[in-house]
Amino acid sequence: MAMPETPSTSSLGQKMLSIPRGVWFLLLIVLATVPQFVTMTIPNIPEDSSAALYKELMTLPEGSTVIVQTDWTKSTQGESRGQFDALMRILMRKNIKFAFMSVADPQAPEVARNALKELNLERVKNGEREYKRWEDYVSLGFFPGAEGKGKEIGESMLDAFKASKDKDQSNVERSVLESPVMKGIEKVGDLSAFIVLTGTKSITIALERLHDKVKMLGLVTGVMGPETVNYYTSNQLKGLSIGLKGVYDMETMMQFGANHADSSGKVIYYMKKFTDDIPNWEGKKNLDRGTRYYLTLHFTIGLMIIAVIIGNVGVLLTRKKGNA
Amino acid sequence: MLLLLGVFSLTRIHVLKVFKQQKDWQFSLCLILAMVLIIFAGYNSWLTELAMKPDQLEAIAKLEPNNWPFYKKFQDFLFDGLLQNMDAAMFSVIAFYILSAAYRAFRIRSVEATILLASALLVMLSLLGLASLYWNLGIEKVTGGDPASFWNNFRLKEIADFIGSSIRTPGLRAIDFGIGVGALAMALRLWLGLERAGGSN
Amino acid sequence: MFTFVGMKFTFGVIATFGLYSVLWRENKFYRFWEHVFLGLAAGWALVTLWIETLKPLWWDKMVGSIAENGNTAEPGFWAWAFMLPIGLAGYFVFSRKHAWVGRVPVAIIIGLWSGQQFDVWIQKYWPQMNASMVPLFPTNFGFRPQVPLDNPVLKATIEQNVYLSQAIGNLIGTITLLSVLAYFLFGIELKSKFMQGTTKLGRYLLMVGFGAIFGSTVMMRFTLLIDRMYFIWIEWFQNIVMGRGI
């Protein structure tokens, strides 16, 4: 006598558990690609830490000097490049001089220089002043010993950078301390801010040595976000942007301002932590990489959530079938 | 100087592999070739630009990339075209493995796993503006648009902020304190010469 | 597409696909690009180490410079020459007989690190310990109003109170901090049921932090992938192959 066939629907749980990983990979590629062809600004509530960062950047004195410790490469470009572009746009629009340095990766200085070149080209195309090397910004170099360098910076800027050289307008290598950017900067407290843009623990090393000597601001990747938030909540960092969400927060605040009424008198973003009216950058390029990638992130994270649900439901159904 | 230790070790292994013609020595040859090419390109570019006059450099900076001189194209091709893109690709491959691992291994097996999953889901949802929008629309229906209503405390951002400030941040801070005490203890042991690991007998 | 930029992008895409091919299975195409990547990374490290670090921070300090192009002459300092044997000592790890020499530069670095730790510890953790001391007793037994704080009087009134919701949040935070700290007490045996319960609670609350780390990591990794897809499909395929231009 022939055995009755097991109905195929009875192994739904098993089917759910045996989706080949190639299918998931293909779905991920499709969902990471297709939404990028759609341009859409998604309603957003900026994080408190991002709002604080925007406020601090927008209230930096014009013409002052900041140090930007840029420790990112193309490996974290998805988030770090968006943060770098937003940061540089604000600094350059406010005519703030900056000196950039790196401690974590030997590729970082070249990557930052290339990104700056592109931003400068954009400024020139939009009729804005070109930011000149030596006059408006200098490259301090790459320093592999982050702990030692941080301590040196905390003690004396003159000693920390007396050996650092950059090319002036005549292509002659001179000490960075002679440049208009670093003139008058003798101790780290003379800077208006020390900004760390990183995907590594270099922000922690800088904070340990400098947080009580100068205003520190951070822009970190998603991986570093949860542990760096500790420093923001304990006021060691005055502002913090985390990951792609942080980039999107910055871009939308550059577009709409914070506690700032638009032309019709409507305030788009109300901030819980402060009531200051922080303006936007009207008529300038504000929405870029963060806005482009944010919608796509919804789909990919949605796929992730669906994958977890399918996996767990599959196990549940299989167990129920087993018990039955 | 010590940063070159890794590079020295890598070079030594692959040069020996090529000379002894061990298995897959052809790949080692590719590695050495790539290393030599980018070293040459990097130093050539640096030295060429050092020797240039400012007006020459300014003229080159204004050129479109397609019209750059050969030395600049060569260095840019290797660094920006290959190295940087492969660096990004290597890191992004992990996204596929995260998805695959989440599907296969992220199970509600125990209380700890359930809490971890719930927390991860909440963080991921709170990162998504659209999720917040639709959640808050539901809350708005309950509050009727009243900003002082008690139910405003159940907006997605408020819940996420509450869990973040009350549980996540103190928890991670406590881990940090633990690591800090350990690092201090290790520093003290090194100072007092109590740390014998790696010492010669 | 056959311009320099087009070829650069095309080879970048081929290299990206080469590395992605490992998702299908280990293959020679992947191994080739993996080796090329390692070679390029190692080579670039050698380039930047001299240009960005050793030359300005050691060589120029050691040999000095002559007066030219408006710069004053800078004397060299011969003592910097001692950095070379100390640095080269690290390479003795490859020698079986003299491997002990390799420990000298490592010992110097570790000594410098440990010397900084006391100051670093205070700088890092003191503000966090301060921030952990939060009020636990409410002064107002209501929930904190979620209204815009544009009225200074309203803002002052709200901020001077500790609402019940804040006190509950602070209490949960303090319990979390203490129970997670208790979880890491591995050095002593915890016999009392209260301490065992506390460590168990700490373990559960720790999972919330790990979940947040996982969620943020997912965001970051997916963003990297989205960036790569943008490079392949929009910057290369749409702009270069389809000719819509950059």
Image (tube, coloured by chain):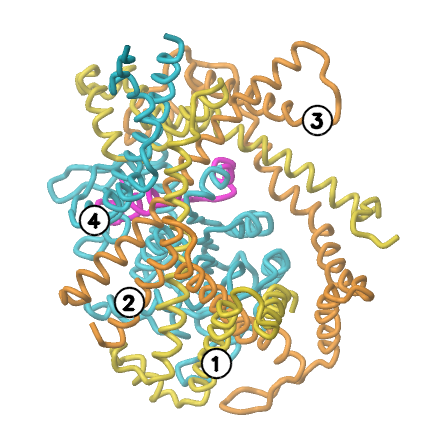
Q: Chain of mark 3?
A: C
Which residue does the numbered mark 1 point to in the structure image?
Answer: B40
State which quadrant residue C2 falls in.
Answer: bottom left
Q: Are marks 4 and 1 in contact (CB under 8 Å)?
A: no
Q: What colour is chain A?
A: cyan
Q: Quadrant of the N terminus of chain B?
A: bottom right
The chain displayed yellow equals B
What's under tag 2, amino acid-wise? Phe
Q: Chain of mark 1?
A: B
The circle drawn on residue C9 is 2
The circle drawn on residue A36 is 4
Q: Are marks 2 and 1 in contact (CB under 8 Å)?
A: no
Q: Which residues are magenta?
A: A230-258
Residue C10: give x, y in percent of width and height: 28, 67
Residue in front for this viewpoint, A74 or C125: A74
Q: Residue furthest right?
A: B201
Neighbour class for label 4 at 10 Å: few (<14), some, many (≥20)? many
What's under tag 4, amino acid-wise? Gln
Residue in front for this viewpoint, A278 or B109: B109
Neighbour class for label 1 at 10 Å: few (<14), some, many (≥20)? some
